[in-house]
Image (cartoon, grey):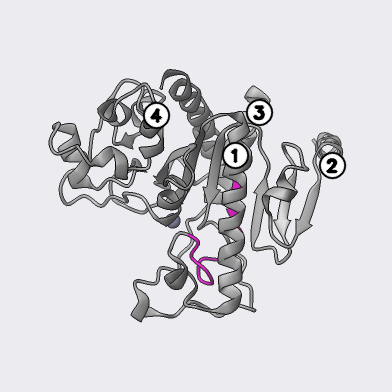
Amino acid sequence: MRKFSFVYGLIFLLLCTSVEAQVVGLDILVSHQSGDILKDKEGWVEVIKGDLPLVLSVPHGGRFKDEQIPDRDCPDLGRVVKGIDMNTKELAMAMQEHFYRQYGKRPYVVIANLSRSKVDQNREIELATCNDPVGIKAWHSYHSAVAAVVTDAKRYGKVFFVDVHGHAHKVQRLELGYNLTTKQLTSAYNHKNTDKMPGTSSLANYFAQGGNKDFYDMLFGTFAFGTLLEKNGVCATPSLQDPHPQEGEAFFSGGHLTRKFTAADFPYVFGVQIEFHFKGIRDTDSNRKKFAEAFAKTYWEFIKNI
Ligand SMILES: [Zn+2]
């Protein structure tokens, strides 16, 4: 086993390079190959270059409490949430590794190593940083890395952006945030008042670019992402099997990063915020691997059919 690890490590070193830059921008990304690890100078942000039009963003899995940046404390600007989404970085890494092992291709991964107690990458800049000047730099470092990654990934096709989070809600299922609330999902399922929803959802660019499936099918159809997850053994809403949360059930409908990177400024990107429950998905190495397998299967079935 030790010998194997050594050989594996050597192969990794030969195949992949790890590079440090001021910020991870497009100029740096284009000159690297799939599997290369790129970091900003301060170690706040880490990017693993991919070769699929799939981007995993992990804004809340970081543990680095950089002392240059004070803990966030600005309740006058909004609700300051500082907790880590435990093991989401490990989950995204397991997903990337499975893709490479099974299919020989990797999604892009962008990870905030900086703790959410210092900067919340999934908020508008003020609440994210409490206006700390170094925190502002760290926020820009993450956001410019995501912008660079989605731009680089588009050479492989329309980009599917997945913002990876962890929830602690009672109902144990994946919450798919398309920027649609429980009320909107319930209306959409009942074919009511749906006129404006596609354009404000995180799938807006898919529809604007002439996607084959309609709004209802993308949420509740046979080839909706949630439906395929359920088929592959993972509970998820919205889906054909579990169309929308019930009134009063906690549900995350999508956040800043998902809104920003699936907006008109990035017309080739559509996506979803996925909030993962802990037990059976994020908790152990073998569960993360098992989920990674189901996710990759779901992704291929989804992409081929939409
Ligand atoms: Zn989160």
* Residues at circles 1 and 4 in contact by the CB criterion of under 8 Å: no
Asked if the residue under mark 3 is in contact with the one under mark 1, i.e. CB atoms within 8 Å, the reply is no
Tell me what residue is drawn at x 29 percent, y 36 percent. 238
Give left or right: position of 33 versus 281: right
User: Which one is earlier in the sequence, the residue at label 1 or at label 4?
Assistant: 1
Label 2 CB, ligand 1: below 8 Å?
A: no
- Density class for disc 4 (Cα within 10 Å; few <14, some 14-19, many ≥20) is many
Gap between marks 1 and 4 measured at Cα: 17 Å
Earlier-in-chain disc, 3 versus 4: 3
Q: Which residue is mark 1?
A: 94
Q: What is the spatial separation of the Cα atoms under label 1 and label 3, in whole angstroms?
A: 13 Å
Residue located 17% across and 46% down the image: 183
Secondary structure of the magenta portion, mostly? loop
Q: Nearer the viewer, mark 3 or mark 4?
A: 3
Residue 106 visible to an observer of this rendering: yes
Q: Secondary structure at mark 1?
A: helix
Mark 4 CB near ligand 1 (8 Å cut):
no
Task: Please report contact status of discs 4 and 2: CB closer than 8 Å, yes or no.
Answer: no
C-alpha span from label 1 to label 2: 19 Å
Read off the residue under disc 4.
Answer: 229
Report the span colored magenta: 108-121
- The C terminus - image quarter: top left
* Mark pair 4, 2: CA separation: 34 Å
Q: Circle 2 is placed at which residue position? A: 13
